């Protein structure tokens, strides 16, 4: 697709350079640094106390079972593994699991779900504007632009004080017109860690419903914040109130299957007939983009969720990941009064009030790799790295 800036390109040789995704660049930079004591708190993968990202024990067992029992790799169709979606349904939707106006399908990760959700919106209403709080996950805006929807940015976060700019958020959503989209983070806000409180969710849902906006909730970290049900509070409240809603979900983090790309998209409309039609469009778009989602990771998640004993063991491993996130947060928060906000936030990320120059200096002087925005992955740190990390950050804040 050509856009305004590259409209003159006629051959492959004419293509303009691409400013590639900053997080992907950061992975490569950290990997290339030969210093053995470098600290990589860039991209969002969970690490344990020793600094590893192990495959969950329960996942290893499910994968073995999959190898032992799978008898065919024949096509499944654009919906992917239907039982996988059925099993996720109550985990995500809670009391709305029985609502037949909500339909879901497997997607290649949360990113695939987002793209597909925005494809659906662009098909239904190409003039919809998407209200996007900033900062947000760096891939949100490019995905929205890729389906040629307009973006209305509003400030979500006050970096100096570590608080949500809630009044600005509400004022922005109040300017929405019916059919415009509110893109919201379900839990564990990426990149800030600053989640809406339950009262704030109530207010957001009220404005979304009053203005006739279409909520699209991106929930990629369910279970990493307060708990599976608690983290789905906003999703479920939205479904309580709104006839139309879209949810992009990911299992990549809570099942630790990042590269396997395991996610799902959920669509609610006001009637089962309208949902069926919307899903027919979704299947068509999926067919055009990837035809069918990759099977392996979702098949393993399916095995875990379909077996009471494996499911219970997954919950134990998920709880251990959440506990580590929260305990590392508390250790960092205790290091300096200017870092206490980190202890009040949720999920893998927080954003430090550092300038880009300070971030680059930390990289050069201490081998600490975080996003230029000051976003860092709390559990990118091994236990042994925490003190060195906080000393480096405090030194940068003092400078
Ligand atoms: C992150 O934000 O670090 C992760 O979601 C990885 C990604 O794809 O950007």
Image (spheres, helix red, strand yellow):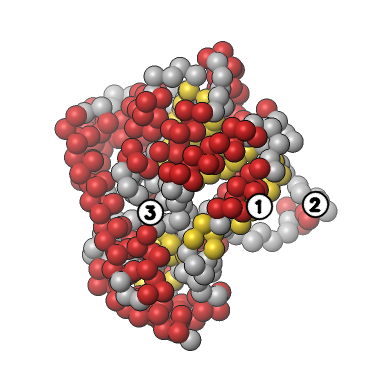
Tell me, yes or no, if residue 135 can be seen here.
Answer: yes
Q: Please give the residue where the numbered disc 2 appears in the rendered image.
A: 4
Instruction: Say which of marks 2 and 3 sits in front.
Output: 3
Give the quadrant of the N terminus: top right
Image height of 381 relative to 83, above or below: below
Task: Tell whether 14 sits left or right of 285.
Answer: right
Q: Are marks 2 and 3 in contact (CB under 8 Å)?
A: no
Residue 366, compared with residue 326, is above or below; it is below
Residue 153 image label: 1
> Which of the two residues, 15 or 13, is positioned nearer the viewer here?
15
Q: Is residue 99 left or right of residue 310?
A: right
Q: Which residue bears the numbered disc 3?
A: 347
* Image x and y of residue 6, in percent: 77, 54
Query: Quick check: 19 above or below 106?
Result: below
Label 1 and label 2: CA atoms lie apart by 21 Å
Residue at the image point whose x is 57% and y is 43% from the top: 183
90 or 64: nearer the viewer? 90
Q: Nearer the viewer, residue 11 or 229?
A: 229
Rendered residue at 75%/47% (across/down): 2
Give me the C-alpha separation between circle 1 and circle 3.
23 Å
């Amino acid at each position: 697709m050509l856009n305004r800036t590259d409209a003159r390109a006629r051959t492959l040789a004419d293509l303009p350079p691409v400013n590639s995704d900053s997080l992907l660049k950061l992975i490569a930079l950290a990997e290339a640094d030969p210093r053995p004591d470098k600290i990589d708190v860039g991209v969002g993968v969970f690490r344990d106390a020793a600094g590893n990202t192990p495959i969950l024990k329960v996942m290893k067992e499910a994968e073995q079972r999959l190898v032992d029992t799978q008898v065919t790799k024949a096509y499944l169709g654009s919906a992917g593994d239907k039982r996988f979606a059925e099993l996720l349904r109550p985990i995500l939707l809670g009391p709305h699991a029985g609502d037949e106006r909500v339909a879901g399908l497997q997607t290649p990760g949360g990113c695939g779900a987002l793209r597909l959700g925005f494809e659906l919106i662009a098909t239904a209403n190409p003039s919809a504007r998407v209200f996007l709080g900033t900062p947000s996950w760096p891939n949100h805006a490019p995905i929205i632009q890729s389906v040629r929807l307009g973006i209305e940015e509003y400030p979500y976060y006050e970096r100096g004080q570590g608080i949500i700019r809630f009044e600005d958020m509400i004022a922005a959503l109040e300017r929405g017109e019916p059919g415009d989209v509110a893109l919201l983070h379900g839990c564990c806000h990426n990149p800030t860690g600053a989640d809406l409180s339950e009262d704030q969710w109530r207010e957001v849902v009220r404005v979304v419903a009053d203005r006739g906006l279409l909520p699209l909730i991106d929930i990629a970290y369910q279970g990493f914040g307060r708990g599976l049900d608690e983290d789905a509070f906003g999703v479920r409240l939205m479904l309580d109130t709104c006839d139309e809603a879209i949810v992009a979900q990911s299992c990549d983090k809570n099942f630790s299957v990042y590269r396997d790309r395991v996610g799902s998209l959920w669509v609610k409309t006001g009637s089962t007939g309208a949902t069926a039609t919307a899903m027919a469009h979704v299947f068509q778009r999926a067919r055009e983009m990837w035809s069918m989602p990759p099977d392996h990771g979702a098949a393993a998640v399916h095995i875990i969720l379909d077996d009471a004993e494996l499911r219970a063991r997954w919950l134990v491993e998920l709880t251990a990941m959440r506990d580590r996130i929260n305990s590392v947060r508390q250790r960092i928060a205790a290091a300096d009064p200017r870092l206490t906000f980190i202890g009040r936030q949720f999920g893998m990320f927080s954003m430090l009030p550092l300038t880009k120059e300070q971030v680059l200096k930390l990289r050069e002087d201490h081998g600490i790799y975080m996003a230029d925005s000051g976003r860092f992955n709390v559990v990118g740190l091994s236990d042994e790295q925490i003190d060195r990390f906080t000393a480096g950050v405090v030194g940068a804040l003092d400078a």
